[in-house]
Structure formats: structure tokens, C-alpha cells
Amino acid sequence: MNRLLIVLSLLPAIAGKVGASPHSTDFESWFGGDLVPYVRQQLTTLPRFRGESFRFVVMNDDSPQSQGSALVLDLRDRLRDAIANEAGVHVVWLAGQPGIGLATDSSGLDCTRNHADYFIGMQLEAMTPGQVRVTVKALDTAEHAWVAGFSRVWQVAVTSRQRRQLHKIVADPGFRGKRDAPWNDTETDLMAANLAYELGCKLLKQMDGKYVVAASNIHGNLTTSTPLVELVSNNLAGSHALQFSDANTNAVIEGKANRIDANLYQYWISIQPTGEASGMSVLSANAYVRIPDKHTAAMLLPDATYELQASTSGFLTSFGIVRMSDRRACPGGSQMYSTAASSRQRNGDCFALQARSADDAVLFFLNHQLQNGLVRLANENCARSSLAKVVRINETVKMPLPLDSMHSAKWTAGESWSSNPRADTYLVIAASDSSAARALSKHIESLPKRCSAAVRPGLEGDELRRWLAGLDAIVEHWTPAVDWKSVHVKEVY
């Protein structure tokens, strides 16, 4: 079967196009009188197109693009809508485009729904003021060759509003989740449905065996679960691509977000084989998502007096991140770089953890690094013993952090302590009793140390869960002489 791609491309128009018109025409008259009739005639009369499917895209270098000018995307959409109801023409609609359903029916996933035998594409190029050159052509996707006889070029007059649209670059909704068209944090359900679709189709194609995940994983009862994992799991359960059971499980669903830039993350969702099935393949899908910063900005000392709300129990009344006015106060801040002309202080912002207590207490500071595990904070000398701070009743104490140790100067209060946090987390554990402080110090000394801005491998997985179980026993034994609080530096799925 010949497979063709009809292209709406952003490439410069090439010379010698078939049927090129030397004359300019009004945009609306051209759209209804030339473009739509030409494409309709090609798709309904050429034998090679009979029974095939079509997808309308913007192209560059023979490849669909995830973004383009507002004008070319609007033109693409109008052309697609005009052709979609034509008898005998099957148009492929991608998830993420308006009006496209994501749910599966009782028959399960249709993994061919995104496949098109032909892509229909368009190119717009600005010419003289008030003119654009429009190219429409076809490409065989199997052979990756242009289709002879399907290529037209027009020169069309545009309005001032359309000229502005030509210079406005926007994401193509049909490519949501790509780097240039990321999801946003209000589209978690759509993102989860698309990830589940991609992962489900990989499950149906694999030949390693049957993957069985604990039913409780859907409801977020496992430590590896997050809200997005739960949504993906529910979508997979409805598609019949993955088996969920509370017996004979051999896999878990996990999710991780990797920072790409300030607000852009690449989210990975994976099915990880466990136990005897560890030899089976790891299946994964990924999507880009933009998560705007919604945290409280760290404030400059000594003017900053912001505190978290008082704890409902315990004696730690506040814990947060503050900006230090003198970078030399932070580890590494006193280092100088000399040049022939002068010496200058090392670049980087200086932040500190700040805690306040309603009782005399000994404080220990920890860092749960996203994807790198739990460590204890130490000084530049990386002393073997736990680094403790003493705070007096109703006073504050600060724990300076190494320069450049934080990607973000913003934070939010943590409500719980998870063995699999969704963000970089800083914690303070306090003891108002000397015996409790000694017990905590001994337990905390078993954690790997972090002495500089560089992340260090920490406790993760079963090892971390055992450590937390030991901490829980200490807290329970010495209640109410032990308290703790946490802050998240960046929130991700």
C-alpha cells in the first residue's frame, strides 16, 4: 500500500512547483475557491488515495513540526475541517486536538488511531509586505518521497492581522507532550491518558510475557505512587492492556520528572519488572510538561521575618528557607578566584535553612534529594559525626547551605515525609531531651553525608524505608521530646 504524506510545510518555497500561480489573490477567496477544491479533488479522485487515511500537519525538512506560526496552524485547521466530512476521506485526529476523546471502549486500545497513510501539509513564507507564498504538497511516508502531481504554490494577499499571526509562533495541539509543545500543570488528566495510551500500545506489542501490577498501585497505596501514576494506572486498567491483581504481581508502575530548564520537565512513566520477572523488559513512555513556579520566595536577611504556621503539635514553630545577605556566610562563599587585575568572590546565591523552637533543642538537618536519596547535611570539613545546631527557647537558628546548592530559591511547606518525595526536600529533626538527641545523632550518622553543593548518593528504596522505620521508632519512644518539619524546594509530579 502506498503511503503518502501531504504536507503543510514551513520550508522556503522551492522553484519549479507544479501549478504555481504568479498572481496574488484575496486570502478568503483563495481559501474557498482554490485551496479547498484542489485538495478535495486530489483526495477523492486519485486512485492511490482510495481507502487511505490522512493527517493534516505543518512540516519542516519533511518532518511534522510541533509548532508553527499562528497563521499556518489556523489555515491547517480550517483545511482539515473542510475536508474531514468529505465522503471516503478518513482524517486522523491526534490526541490533544480539540474535541478528541481519549477513553477506550470495551475492545481495548486502538493502537492504529494515530497512524495516517497520508499527511496533509502546508508551508507559508512571507513575501513582499501584505503577501505570503503558500505551498501544499504530498509526501509518501513509507518511501519518504514527494508525490508527483500533488504540489501547488499560490501567492496570496493577507491582512495586517494575518501578518501578525504569521510572526506569532505557537504550539500545535496535536503534538502535546513534545518538547516544543509541553503539557501544562492543569492538563494532568490529558497527559496521563496519552502516556497510558503510549505505554499500553507498547504492552500489547511486547512478547516477554504478562505484566501484573498490584491493584493497590492504582489507588496510590505504594510508596512509588504519585497522583500522575495513579491516573495512568486507572487509564491502563480501563484499556485492558495491563493486568491488575493483588496476587502473583511481577511489576510496579513508577514515575519520575527530570528538570530540563527552569519550569520545563520531562516526565517518565515506567513499568518495572520485579522478582522473578526481572529479566523482562522495562517499558516506558515520556512527555514534556511545564510546571510554573508557585512557591514562596526566599527573603533576604535580616529583613526577612516570614515563618511557617505554628505546628499543631510539637515544639518546632517554624522552618523555612531564607536568603543570606553575605555570601561568605555559606560554605564555599569565602573562596576567592584571583586574576591578574583583581580577585572576585565566587558567584552563587547564599541560602540557609532557618528554624524556630518553643523549647531548648538540638537540631539536625537532612536533605532528601530528588532521585538521589536521603543525606544528612554536613559542613565543609565533612566531619564524621552528625552536624547539630543548638537553639534556645523562642529563638531561631540558621543552617547555611553551600553556594549553588539549590536550583530554586523558592519553597513550600511540607505536610508529610515520604520515602519517595516529589521534590527536593530539606528537613529538620529536633530533640528537646539530651537522651533523645543522642539517639537521633547515632541514627542520623548512618546517613551518607552531603558536604558541598554537589548532590551525593543517599539512601533510597528498601534501605531508606528501613532507616525511616528506625526513625519512627525513635520518635515514638521519645514523644513529645522529638519534632520535625520539612520544606519542598520545587514541586513536580
Image (cartoon, rainbow, N blue to C red):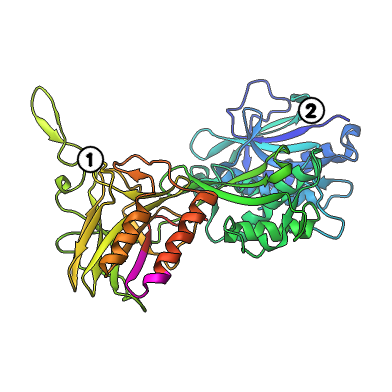
Residue indicated by mark 1: 381
Percent across and percent down for residue 146 are 74, 25
The residue most toward the front is 435
Q: Amino acid at mark 1?
A: Asn
Percent across and percent down for residue 379 are 24, 45
Q: Is residue 212 left or right of residue 401?
A: right
- Is residue 296 found inside the magenta-colored segment of the image? no
Q: Secondary structure at mark 2?
A: loop
Tell which of 246 and 232 is nearer to you: 246
Q: Residues within 10 Å of mark 2 (few under 14, many from 20)?
A: few
Residue at x-position 82% and y-position 53%: 85
C-alpha distance separating marks 1 and 2 = 62 Å
Q: Is residue 266 above or below residue 482?
A: above
Percent across and percent down for residue 411 are 35, 59
Tell which of 383 and 406 is nearer to you: 383
Residue at x-position 51% and y-position 49%: 463
Q: Secondary structure at mark 1?
A: loop
Residue at x-position 54% and y-position 51%: 462
Q: Residues within 10 Å of mark 1 (few under 14, many from 20)?
A: few
Tell which of 284 and 79 is nearer to you: 284
**Residue range corresponding to the magenta coloring:** 476-485
Residue indicated by mark 2: 142
Residue 114 in sight from this viewpoint = no
Q: Is residue 472 left or right of residue 6?
A: left
Residue 145 in sight from this viewpoint = yes
The part of the image, by quadrant, that contains residue 358 is bottom left
Q: Amino acid at mark 2?
A: Ala
